[in-house]
Amino acid sequence: MKSTHIVILVGLAIFIVALGVNLSKNVSTYADFDMARQSGKQIHISGEWVRRDQGGYDQTQDLFTFYLKDTLQNVELVHFYDPMPMNFDKAEKVVVVGGYQDEGFVADKIITKCPSKYEETDITAGEPVQQ
């Protein structure tokens, strides 16, 4: 084998290993609040917005706070340093992506799952199908 081929193969192997290590660090998994607290990693938590009368948006800090109940019925205050996402108040389910910091669970991203988006509609009339 030529030395250039060996150098290319070694470089390719280093690239593949570096890519694998980087991807494994950035992979986020679904969990509950307890698992998120213990892991210290970026986590997806699926749940529902509860205690809707508590929390809210603080414009001075650009902070939206709300309570989320995870799949194991644990309720935690979630901090999101951005305004409330569109359609958040209509969402049946919410997925937060984030982790625990000094102030508690901090979401970097919020994904809402609105029921109207998934309703079956009659194509001709544009109305929800009654079953």
Image (cartoon, rainbow, N blue to C red):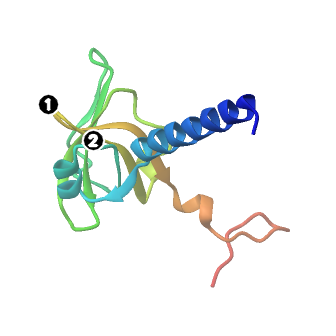
The reply to whether residue 38 is visible in this rendering is yes
Q: Give the image location of residue 51, x and y in percent.
A: 22, 51
Q: Secondary structure at mark 1?
A: loop
Query: Residue at (77%, 71%) from the top-left corner?
Result: 122
Disc 2 residue type (three-letter):
Gly
Per the image, the residue denoted by label 2 is 99
In the picture of the structure, the residue carrying the numbered disc 1 is 102
Which residue is situated farthest in the bottom direction here? Answer: 131
| Residue 61 vertical placement versus 130 (above, below) | above
* Outermost residue, left side: 102
Residue 7 relative to residue 70: left or right: right
Answer whether residue 46 is visible to the viewer in this image. no
Q: Residue at x 57, y 42 (%)?
A: 16
Closest to the observer: 57 or 126?
57
Residue 30 versus residue 42 in the image, above or below: below
Mark 1 burial class by Cα count in 10 Å: few <14, some 14-19, many 20+: few
